[in-house]
Amino acid sequence: MTFEEALAKAEQGDHLSLDASASLLAARGGNLRAMMKVADQKRAEQVGDTVTYVINRNINFTNVCIKRCHFCAFSDDLRSGSGYFLPLEEVVRRAKEARSMGATEVCIQAGLAPELNASKYLKMTETVKNAVPDLHLHAWSPEEIKHGAKQSRVSIRSFLTELKAAGLDSLPGTSAEILDDRLRRRLAVGRISTAQWIDVVQTAHELDLMTTATMMFGHLESAHDQARHLLTLRQVQKETGGFTEFVPLAFVHHQAPLFTSHEGVRPGPSTEERLAVYSASRLILGDVIPNLQVSWVKEGMSLAARILQAGANDLGGTLINESISTAAGSSHGQRQTPQALTQVAQGIGRPFQQRSTLYQPIADSSSSAWGADYGSFFDLRKDQRFAYHSTGRPSKSARVSMSQASPRR
Ligand code: SF4
């Protein structure tokens, strides 16, 4: 199918096949500019002009991980000497501090430390929720859900049910990368499979736990691989309606082992590819997943503004302690103030609105406490108070048992 035919179908709202979707994702030059215009119109029709954002804080409580995903520069081996593990009281302190800054969400994700199991994840969920009940608890990637369930020999459904009862509100749909097992094996040995990722998010949705949806692009994959990924997400959303938003995540290559020691890997996407992925995503997914989030961490504020004019409608969150992209070499900062996010919208003449994690409009909740230093990822790795070997392992007394452990399905 030609690009013109695919764009005409998208404009009419017709079903887009794999070939048509790939044709849009591969658009460059004049074709790209034409597609961005249509995507911007579709964004206005599907979700309006308002640029939304959430005030949140990331708490990546450990970088110790048993996996060695080739694209990941965040994790450390448990014997590396630069592993950290925040004790539960520090996680709670950070959540309370975020609330005092006006945050409405904490996002908790981390490495797969060997001692983490379902009980530990449940304990952290319950403790944070009890300490700050009005914070939306957005936590645990599908890979972490799989890890906790496997370590404790419980089913995904049982584990998610327990997490929800303990206070989990929603989950990040990370660890998706590209939903193609052939590529996943090259990106990360032993990574959660496509079927397992879909199983975790579908099960969460069935339990009324919403998730985000993501795609990492600009590494090994082709436009056809991207198209297959988007159509898979589309199918899941049509079945469950459980995705709050789609977040394309550009591969950050600088420190990623995938780029530094593997041949044939692209150094992240070009600017044109970034614009193409965002605008094509609006056309392929916008009728079923209306919220398309631009990641300022990956794109920077200036390109984020352009992407908001190419199909995106959301700027994500303040983050406060971004670690994953920073570790990989992203230079766009670890936090943004609410004012900085609203200025991006103002700069392109669009209204802005603070939102909840689930995209409900909420009144400005930011405090004046944003001038302080809330720590950097690199300092954290050197902070002996949180060194993995000395204080990181949760004590035996911190363990809780699952009340309804059931066999894995
Ligand atoms: S991506 Fe996640 S699972 Fe993979 S190495 Fe990094 S922290 Fe570990």
Image (tube, rainbow, N blue to C red):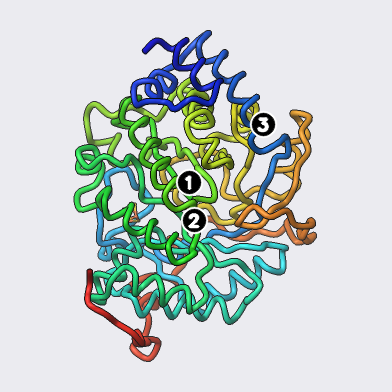
- What amino acid type should be assigned to the residue bearing mark 1? Thr
Instruction: Determine if the C-beta at disc 3 is less than 8 A from ligand 1.
Output: no
Is residue 316 depicted above or below 248 in this figure?
below
Label 3's element? helix
Q: Are marks 1 and 3 in contact (CB under 8 Å)?
A: no
Q: How many angstroms separate mark 1 from mark 2 (CA)?
A: 8 Å
Describe residue 114's horizontal placement relative to residue 50 as left or right: left
Callout 1–callout 2 Cβ contact below 8 Å: yes
Q: Secondary structure at mark 1?
A: helix
Q: In x, y percent, where is residue 251? A: 40, 36
Judging by the rendered image, the residue that carries numbered circle 2 is 377
Task: Point out the quarter of the image occupied by ligand 1.
Answer: bottom left
Q: Residue at x 39, y 34 (%)?
A: 217
Q: Nearer the viewer, residue 190 or 313?
A: 313
254 on left or right of 37 = left
Q: Quadrant of residue 61?
A: bottom left
In the rendered image, residue 365, in percent from the top left (x then y), is placed at: 77, 60
- Decide if residue 263 is in sight here: yes
Asked whether 324 or 381 is in front, the reply is 324
Quarter holding the C terminus is bottom left
Kind of residue at badge 3: Glu
Q: Is residue 336 left or right of residue 83?
A: right
Neighbour tally class for label 2: few under 14, some 14-19, many 20 plus, Cα within 10 Å: some
Instruction: For marks 1 and 3, give the one nearer the viewer.
Output: 3
Q: Quadrant of the image for the N terminus?
A: top left
Identify which amino acid the numbered label 2 is placed on: Phe
Crowd rating for badge 1 (residues with CA inside 10 Å; few <14, some 14–19, many 20+): many
Residue drawn 50% across the image and 11% down it:
31
CA–CA distance between discs 3 and 2? 40 Å
Label placed on residue 45? 3
